[in-house]
Image (spheres, rainbow, N blue to C red):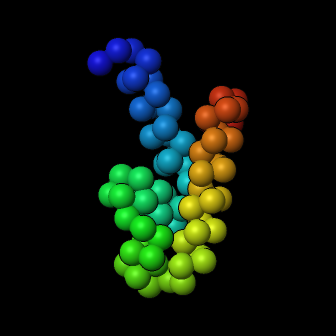
Amino acid sequence: EPRNVVLDRVLVTEALNRLQPLHREVIRRAYYLGWTTDQIAADLRVAEPVVKSALHNALHTVRHLLANPTLR
């Protein structure tokens, strides 16, 4: 793989590892497993709005960490 792809994966992995456990789990289920927010809510036994909020906050945090390398 090209060096940039490997570096990107490392940076994303580091950012994901800094998330709260719930945020990490909703990201994993939504983007790695392709689940809907309804499926995630049922699996985690929480309300769907909780999943939507966690997903929104998790993505915001990951974007912020990736855009601000000094925070890593």
Q: Residue furthest left?
A: 1
Q: On the image, which quarter does residue 30 sit in?
A: bottom left
| Residue closest to the eye, 38 or 44 | 38
Residue lying furthest top: 2
For image coordinates 39% across by 15% down, the residue present is 3
Q: Quadrant of residue 54?
A: bottom right
Residue 31 at least partly seen: yes
Work out whether 54 lies above or below 46: above
**Does residue 44 show up?**
no
Depicted 53 relative to depicted 17: above or below: below
Point out residue 36 in the picture as x, y percentages from the top left corner: 42, 67
37 with respect to 19 (left or right): left
Give the image location of residue 50, x and y in percent: 59, 76
Residue in front for this viewpoint, 11 or 38? 38
Tell me the quarter of the image containing the C terminus.
top right
Tell me the residue at 58%/69% (across/down). Answer: 52
Left or right of 33? Residue 31 is: right
- Residue in the picture at 55% in, 49% down: 18
Q: Quadrant of the N terminus?
A: top left
Residue 32 position within the rendered picture, expressed as x and y whole percent measured from the top left: 36, 52
Residue 36 in the image: above or below residue 13: below
Residue found at x 54% / y 84%: 47
Number of marks in the rendered image: 0
